Image (cartoon, rainbow, N blue to C red):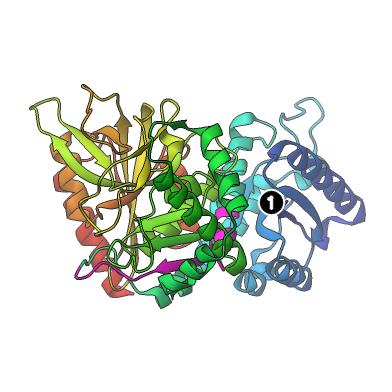
Amino acid sequence: MKKLYFITGSQDLYGEETLRQVAEDSKDMVSFLDEKLGVASVEWVPTVRDHKGAIDAMVKASSDDECIGVIMWMHTFSPAKMWTTALQKLNKPMLHLHTQHNEKLPYDEIDMDFMDLNQSAHGDREFGFMCTRLGIKREIVVGYYKNDSTLNKIRRFAEACIAVDFSHGMRVAMFGNNMIDVAVTDGDRVESEIHFGWNVNYYAIGKLIDIKNALTDAEIDAKMAEYNEKYIMDTDNIDAVREQASIEVAIDKFLEKNNIQAFTDTFQDLYGLKQLPGIAAQNVMARGIGFGPEGDYKTSALCAVLNKFAEKRDGATGFTEDYTYDLTEGEELELASHMLEVTPVFAASKPKIQVHPLGIGNREDPARLVFDSIEGDALQISIIDMGDRFRIICAKVELVKEPKNMPKLPVARLMWKLKPDFNTGAAAWIYAGGAHHAVVTTALDVDDIRLFCKLTDTELVVIDENTDLVSFEKELELLDIKAKLK
């Protein structure tokens, strides 16, 4: 389990007795948080009292591979100049916890000794000024640390840190390259690694074929047994399903061998494959592996990162694509799907394995999972390369039940309503440059995405029930001006 450092600030002014109490109180808080967070451990750091101690604490946090972030708290007043150099050395996400060890004031007994010891209201403001002066991106959580609302915000920060830590050094494989002449799925892979830590590389499809051709019947049989246990076999074309099973086993081996957490493919480069990966890609995604079709490495990587963020949450996260609309006035719906690759974590009931023709890719009829989706509130999240920065567009949507059956559409699909309404939601997405590929999640909320963007210094645009197109266009103009001024 990764860990957060809990760093408490004070100074020598108050004497050793006060400093002993500061240490005891902070250890008590660490013990509580370590027990309650559940997603990361919390490690106590000796009280920082001076300039050297501050530097030592930040250098230790920055150099510890197991440390994913720091929680800062000023128990007493802690002069902020002593933190200046130290803060500039910190390269991990920061949560500034504005709280107290004591919940209530002892009104009948309070004296100046108590005031000197318990002055976070004073010390945290001093520390906060220096962070603001240095332009440090951080999360600030205010409230008594034992309250559920405060604890939930700290836990959210820990989950975001896990996602950011996972993002740094994450490896993405591109089987084939970007779809010919498509713009929005392309991007600067070098800048992706500089900004997010995504190590993205092209691999010839032959690398996968070599693994596939060396598989044993037993390996394929084991994958078929998994399919039969998890899904309904709704086809007599077992050979087609076995072909997908062999593709998936090959993908599994390739990902493990090369330490890959996300991948792409493209129907324009299937040399040596009999089918476009269908159930193979779907079943891999269900394990949290990122996926993007047509060489869309950005969506693939974001999918993996958001799956990591939501690892301990209830709900579904995965790739899908804007496809077509029902434009019945006042009842507009979007149908989202793809040729084959929608993850079964969105399935409302047990998915069926079916084999049908695919009029693209010039290959044999592929096996795929077919299902209708769950219902409920969700986010549609797109990442685009604006040339001078990355932008994440996050739109609130509502997953809904299909109004009618679609017996001739043999693919997995989702249907949703746009917010605040269809016209505004669709126009805002297009104004913002949102892609046709996206990650949809029912596990994360807007505050989660906002926190991830803050900790990675990524531009965020939100489309929700309060979106107004006039204000939205002005926001986009200001973002462009801000980017040009950097």
- The amino acid type of the residue labelled 1 equals Trp
Residue 190 screen position, x and y as percent: 42, 77
To which quarter of the image does residue 143 belong?
Answer: top right
Q: In the rendered view, does 99 fall on the left or right side of 22? A: left
Please, is residue 444 above or below residue 438 in the view? above
Residue 6 screen position, x and y as percent: 73, 53
Which residue is rendered at x = 74% and y = 72% of the image? 51
Which residue is rendered at x = 51% and y = 69% of the image? 197
- Closer-to-camera residue (64/72): 64
Residue 448 screen position, x and y as percent: 47, 45
Which residue is rendered at x = 70% and y = 33% of the image? 146
| Magenta run includes residue 255 | no
Q: In the rendered view, does 84 fall on the left or right side of 420? A: right
Q: Residue furthest bottom?
A: 190
Q: Quadrant of the C terminus?
A: bottom left
- Closer-to-camera residue (202/251): 251
Residue 267 screen position, x and y as percent: 29, 61
The image shows a total of numbered marks equal to 1
Secondary structure under the numbered disc 1 in the rendered image: strand
Please, is residue 58 above or below residue 143 in the view? below
Which residue is rendered at x = 85% and y = 50% of the image? 23
Q: Quick check: can you spot residue 111?
A: yes
Q: Pointer 1: what residue?
A: 73
- Closer-to-camera residue (264/228): 228
Q: Quick check: can you spot residue 199?
A: no
To which quarter of the image does residue 483 belong?
Answer: bottom left
| Magenta run includes residue 175 | yes
- The magenta span reads 162-181
Please, is residue 165 above or below residue 464 in the view? below
- Closer-to-camera residue (20/479): 479
Tell me the crowding category of disc 1: few under 14, some 14 to 19, or many 20 or more residues within 10 angstroms, Cα based. many
